[in-house]
Amino acid sequence: MSITVRAAGLGDAAPMSTVLAEILEAWGSPRAHSPGHVRAFYIQHPDQVASYVALDGDRLVGFQSLKVARKGNAYDLPLGWGIIGTYVARDAVRRGIGRTLFDATLTAARDAGITRIDATIGAGNAAGLAYYIAMGFEPYRTLAGAVGTRFHTGQRR
């Protein structure tokens, strides 16, 4: 396995959409996942700080998005916090892809002056919660159907 990480580009929207659709289907989630949605929400969003893709050879096997919390953000986070989302193809989990993506995202967060990153995980997503805890996130709030975890970018992993 040789995983490489690079910034997401517009041409990545379709394979990112495929990864996202597979995950959302497994969750039974009706969330949007079309290439257009991925482009608008994970690549070109006005609050986007960074978006990275993980490749195994030519195959896109995961992606991670980091946005900055603005006034009125959907997660009710303090202004300036980072908002992260991580998606790894179901047949590629437990291969270090999430860790590799987070290394790149954490550098981008620090470069952007973001001091805290929030990951809000569905309460039933034990694997997602375990991933973020392994990255150094700590649960700090309980929401309806979700757990809020946070990471201080000044901490060592």
Image: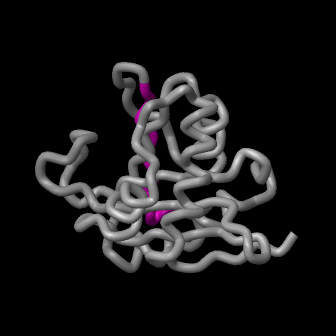
* Up-down relation of residue 102 to residue 149 (above or below): below
Q: Is residue 47 left or right of residue 145?
A: left
* Up-down relation of residue 103 to residue 24 (above or below): below
Secondary structure mostly seen in the magenta stretch? strand
Q: Total number of numbered labels?
A: 0
State the residue at coordinates (50%, 74%).
8
Q: Position of residue 130 (x, y in %)?
A: 65, 38
* Up-down relation of residue 140 to residue 64 (above or below): above
Q: Position of residue 20 (x, y in %)?
A: 55, 49
**Furthest-right residue in this view:** 1
State the residue at coordinates (21%, 49%).
78
Magenta-span inclusion, residue 147: yes
Q: Can the viewer see residue 105? A: no
Q: Which image quadrant: the C terminus?
A: bottom right
Q: Is residue 44 left or right of residue 102?
A: left
State the residue at coordinates (87%, 69%).
1
Q: Nearer the viewer, residue 101 or 23?
A: 23
Q: Nearer the viewer, residue 26 or 87?
A: 26
| Residue segment shown in magenta | 146-155
State the residue at coordinates (69%, 61%).
61
Q: Nearer the viewer, residue 148 or 115?
A: 148
* Rendered image quadrant of residue 99: bottom right
